[in-house]
Amino acid sequence: MRPAMIDDYVGQSHLLGQGKPLRRMLEGGHLHSMILWGPPGTGKTTLARLVALRCNADFIALSAVMAGVKDIRAAAETAATARRESGRRTVLFLDEVHRFNKAQQDAFLPWVEDGTLVFIGATTENPSFELNNALLSRARVYVLRALTVEDLLGVLQRALRNEPDVLIDDGVLSLMATAADGDARRVLNMLELALDLARASEPAHLTQAIANEVAAGGLRRFDKQGEAFYDQISALHKSVRGSDPDAALYWLCRMLDGGCDPRYIARRVLRMASEDIGNADPRVLTMALEACEVYERLGSPEGELAIAQAVVFMACTAKSNAVYVAFGEAMADAKQRGSLDVPLHLRNAPTRLMKQLGYGKDYRYAHNEPDAYAAGEKYFPDEMAPTQYYRPVARGLEIKIAEALERRKKK
């Protein structure tokens, strides 16, 4: 089912459309090393083969799951021989390149540097984290996108050119294309299984029931601890911060549907409660804690509703990061200013010696002062001027907090 020509390639119009960078490179024959980064089933291997074919280069395919440095050396020797005898260049394609450690990745460099090999690596992981800088500096990164439903329909229709006698119900192909979640390999596997079931009848008939059966149970893209994981939790957090309950619910459900542990989401919700809402609505922290407890008592799926309730409320309520910012500034001072002494009047004096040394002397007990506030009392170290870290925002309960702090300053 792999296309034999670049014009038959499905998707990635941002790279292969007329006038786009990779298209210009192929038309000009300017072959260079590259990293193809994208989700599974988006055509990375196929694209690498077409690049080699279009540029009239030999093609050697390896997988980092099985190959090692010995295989890389053997490929380089083959490439050097081909270059001497025929003048042809060689494309070395390494699938799952992120599975090579940094030392193994360095093995490519001499042959890439001297032009013996044109290196094309394919990865589903972020190259910034998984590939070393030396390799990245010698290869251009192209980002492949998940295929659209329309793209996948094209893949299915091309595959069915060899199946003219199969009756296909309306909507069947769209159902499989949607269930494949942007993955051409997955949609072709579905089609293969569906055709096997359809041929059980005479004539072969691909029904809606068969399509429902082969499409059932597929999970959306969600690689735990991988790129999709961090992108989606970031989207959830930012949707809550941006006061969009609907988007927050969508990303929550995307993560749950993808198989994320709800306990991880619940812990992140606790973080949001303090970081983005804080004292603007202190109820939120309690609600987040209760959502965690409800999930521990009920498990999935019942307990997930309590997490959703907390997420929606947090997205709708007043926001403040004043405590988050204040904590960061105070922590920076604590680290930078060293071990400043506690002023004597703030120290406890449980022994006679401590009292004789002045511990606790002249301390003003706030509850004995008007409005329980000792106006003018200093609580910072003597070597440090009073510093304002906490600056309440004009939202939620922090409006009242700001007013109370301002009244105390005037006393």
Image (cartoon, rainbow, N blue to C red):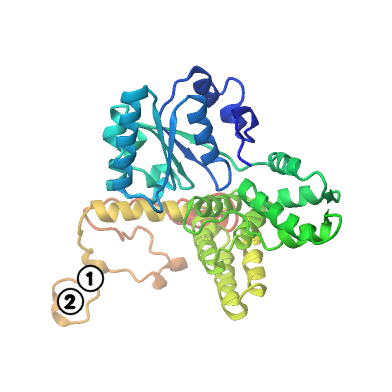
Residue closest to the eye, 349 or 253: 253
Residue closest to the eye, 161 or 279: 161
Q: Secondary structure at mark 1?
A: loop
- Identify the residue at horizontal 13%, vertical 79% (top origin): 353
Asked whether the residues under the numbered discs 1 and 2 touch, taking CB atoms below 8 Å apart as contact, a structural biologist would say yes
Number of on-image labels: 2
User: Which residue lies under the disc numbered 1?
Assistant: 361
Name the mark on residue 355: 2
Q: Hey, what amino acid is under mark 1?
A: Lys
- x, y percent for residue 249: 66, 57
- x, y percent for residue 241: 57, 51
Asked if residue 297 lies left or right of residue 141, the reply is right
Q: Quadrant of the C terminus?
A: bottom left
Does residue 317 appear in the picture of this structure? no
- x, y percent for residue 393: 53, 50
Does residue 189 appear in the picture of this structure? yes
Say which label, 1 or 2, has the lower sequence index: 2
Q: Quadrant of residue 313?
A: bottom right
